[in-house]
Image (spheres, grey):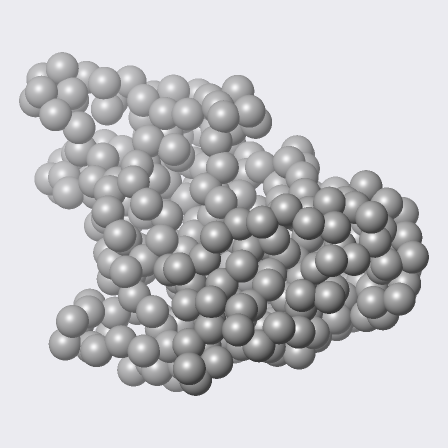
């Protein structure tokens, strides 16, 4: 990947207790690799096509189909979706004209039997779903962020995540005011076209079969796969406490286009000795009063509406960024 700064390696541990995971990583909004965190799970058998076909070959899944360039690179912008059985997917998997990728697919029910729970998952209040990823070398994602906590469990192959803290938001060129994707392709870009990208601080995490990667909500990331590649994401709704925490970090970083006095008012609300829900309600009230007085919003991106305005019902039933 073409970067102006050398990426910082994400922290790694071989084991960690839930209390330490929460205080040192979730509460501090920092990513973490847990080496070997799922190496004893039955899902490690998914490295075998024969095993997967035996237990789930007839399951129908959504597959993203991408044409390949003459150089064999996946053309992300030209993909489409198809529905097929896992058996048919394994047949098409090796085609040379297209890339076939199961991504962000709800985990087929027969595969649940092979999953366990790592102790760190007890830190999170609500699990939204578990998603299934199956691809191969060279497949990559857009640079984007997700509005959820993610425990990515790798069962075959390797993935490399290039990550950016949410506080680098203004340097990462969101496509527009409502999109969760960046205009930048980190594989090939001209710095003259995206000069602020040089100010962003990249982090790198390379995970292999048996590892877990914690990706904090709203961290930007681009992912590249190596080898036959299978993983499951434990998609977890962020807590209200985490939403308020992220809002505070964004305000401190100067992402909101407001005066210093308004910025200080908002940070004072976040620092109050009140429940996260109460502080969130006060942030909403402040924004509503500002709109009434000024006739406009100070949210520069829908991210802030998501963090401050949406309620639990919206999160559980009406919203997902991917």
Q: Is residue 33 visible?
A: no
Q: Is residue 235 above or below residue 42?
A: above
Q: Is residue 122 visible?
A: yes
Residue closest to the eye, 151 or 56:
56
Residue at position x 59%, y 63% in the image: 100
Q: Is residue 117 above or below residue 222?
A: above
Residue at position x 9%, y 20% in the image: 295
x, y (%) of residue 298? 18, 33
- Give the left or right position of residue 182, taking residue 225 as reference: left
Residue at position x 11%, y 39% in the image: 259
Residue closest to the eye, 209 or 218:
209
x, y (%) of residue 86? 75, 55
- Give the left or right position of residue 220, taking residue 111 as reference: left
Residue closest to the eye, 110 or 74:
74
Return the residue found at the far left.
Answer: 294
- Give the left or right position of residue 185, taking residue 313 as reference: left
The N terminus, quarter of image: bottom left
x, y (%) of residue 260? 13, 42
Picture quadrant where residue 177 is located: top left
How many dots with numbers?
A: 0
Q: Is residue 303 above or below residue 104?
A: above
Residue at position x 83%, y 53% in the image: 57
x, y (%) of residue 118? 79, 53
Residue closest to the eye, 2 or 22:
2
């Amino acid at each position: 990947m073409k970067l102006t700064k050398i990426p910082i390696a994400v922290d790694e541990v071989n084991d960690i207790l839930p209390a330490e995971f929460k205080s040192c990583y979730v509460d501090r909004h920092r990513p973490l690799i847990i080496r070997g965190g799922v190496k004893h799970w039955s899902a490690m058998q998914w490295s075998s096509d024969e095993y997967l076909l035996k237990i789930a070959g007839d399951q129908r899944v959504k597959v993203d189909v991408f044409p390949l360039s003459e150089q064999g690179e996946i053309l992300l912008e030209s993909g489409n979706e198809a529905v097929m059985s896992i058996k048919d997917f394994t047949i098409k998997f090796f085609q040379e004209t297209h890339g076939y990728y199961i991504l962000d697919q709800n985990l087929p029910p027969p595969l649940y039997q092979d999953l366990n729970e790592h102790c760190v998952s007890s830190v999170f209040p609500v699990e939204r779903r578990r998603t299934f990823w199956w691809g191969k070398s060279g497949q990559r994602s857009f640079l984007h962020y997700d509005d959820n906590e993610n425990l990515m469990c790798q069962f075959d192959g390797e993935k490399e995540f290039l990550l950016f803290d949410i506080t680098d938001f203004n340097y990462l060129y969101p496509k527009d005011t409502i999109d969760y994707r960046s205009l930048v392709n980190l594989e090939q870009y001209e710095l003259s076209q995206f000069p602020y990208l040089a100010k962003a601080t990249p982090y790198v995490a390379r995970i292999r079969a048996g590892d877990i990667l914690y990706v904090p909500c709203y961290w930007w990331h681009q992912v590249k796969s190596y080898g036959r590649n299978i993983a499951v994401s434990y998609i977890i709704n962020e807590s209200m406490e985490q939403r308020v925490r992220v809002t505070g970090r964004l305000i401190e970083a100067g992402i909101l286009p407001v005066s210093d006095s308004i910025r200080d008012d908002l940070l004072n609300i976040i620092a109050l000795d009140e429940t996260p829900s109460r502080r969130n309600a006060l942030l909403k009230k402040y924004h509503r009063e500002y709109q009434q007085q000024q006739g406009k919003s100070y949210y520069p991106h829908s991210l802030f509406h998501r963090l401050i305005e949406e309620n639990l019902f919206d999160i559980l039933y009406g919203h997902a960024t991917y």
